[in-house]
Amino acid sequence: MKILIDKIAHNHSATVDELEQILSDSECDEYLFSIADQVRHDSVGDAIHIRGLIEFSNYCKNNCCYCGIRKGNGNLPRYHLSVDEIIALAEKAKNYGYQTVVLQSGEDLSFDMNKMEKIIKGIKALDLALTLSIGEKTFEEYKAYFDFGADRYLIRIETTDKDLYHELDPGMSWENRHRCLCDLKKIGYETGSGCMVGLPKQTLRSIANDILYFKSLPVDMCGIGPFIPHPDTPLKDAKGKEFILSLKTMALTRLLLPKINIPATTAMETLYENGRVKALQSGANVVMLNVSDSDDRQLYNLYPNKAGSTGNTITLKNDFLEKVRQIGRTISTTKGSARDN
Ligand code: SAM
């Protein structure tokens, strides 16, 4: 197995059988993590890019079976921020020294083109890099956001198993999600995707195919996180919580795509006390730290006990900086574009 991991790390390519074999074997997990850490060091360096995360709306028109902010969850109080509140949070991120903000929300149709123009231009006037993560849009909408100044866009494919996707995302189409990723790349965004690991009925082979999908696009950024069941969703009794398998999927993605940006995801931190640090030592080079107010953070309730949903945002930042110091890594002083890697 170690020889196979070395070969993949050297060639940055693998077959679906090889990836499945590594995912199914637990003997060399620590070896895989250490090799992914080495590839990360050699390819993108030791600096960690901090993104300031603004979760600006938990309204969503979709009904994804795994997601706590799905339209059908009647137990969740809904909120959305105003244009001025969003720009003020971006300013706060800038004052914290963060050079990129990530705007994330459910698919909230009240954020029309007029509002998006004000938000994007307002944030770009602060000289920040801007990532959007607001779901499926038309080519024309993506192009308009890009022309307003948005730099990057994240949209996870969730799973490449089309049947599973259609089962878990009722009323949505896998082909349309794939179309979104192709349009974003065509327009010129730094494009991020990713998947959840540990979904019901998801096989190791399908996870191996997810990794090959990221390579085939290829993505510039890739967020991989464990699925965590939410009590107010149809998947409340599912098992999920596959921390190690998520970490292995992320580490293998690093071997195949050495120069991309890979976040240590919040879902990893949620499942395991130092999950984010473990991820940063297993191939990741990015973290997203929330800058929203505590009340809103708690309502952006994708899954229970989401890390960083309580407490002061300065404390979140300082705690993280201390952990970075302890593992001997540095904080990036650039905007952290994957294109500079
Ligand atoms: N609406 C946008 C979209 O669809 O891309 C962005 C927001 S969406 C809530 C962000 C991500 O949260 C999803 O892509 C999904 O992978 C993740 N997510 C949702 N529910 C989750 C759960 N129960 N466990 C882990 N991740 C979850």
Image (spheres, grey):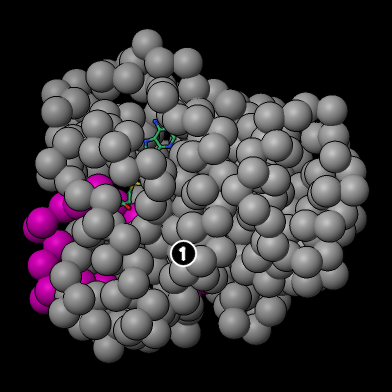
Q: Report the magenta residues as a range.
A: 100-121
Mark 1 highlights which residue? 192
At x 64% / y 32%, what residue is drawn? 245
Residue 177 is left or right of residue 308, and the answer is: left
Q: Quadrant of the N terminus?
A: top right
Q: Position of residue 125 (x, y in %)?
A: 37, 86
Q: Position of residue 182 (x, y in %)?
A: 34, 72
Judge the density around disc 1: few (<14), some (14-19), many (≥20) Cα neighbours within 10 Å: many
Residue 187 is left or right of residue 6, and the answer is: left
Q: Is residue 290 above or below residue 67?
A: below
* Quadrant in the picture for residue 269: top right
Residue 158 is left or right of residue 10, and the answer is: left
The answer to if 116 sits in the magenta stretch is yes
Mark 1: amino acid: Gly
Check disc 1 and report its element: helix, strand or loop.
Answer: strand
The answer to if 167 sits in the magenta stretch is no
At x 17% / y 46%, what residue is drawn? 172
Q: Nearer the viewer, residue 209 or 249?
A: 209
**Can you tell me which quadrant of the image ligand 1 is in?**
top left
* Residue 295 in view here: no
At x 56% / y 52%, what residue is drawn? 211
Ligand 1 closer than 8 Å to the CB at disc 1? no
Q: Position of residue 266 (x, y in %)?
A: 54, 41
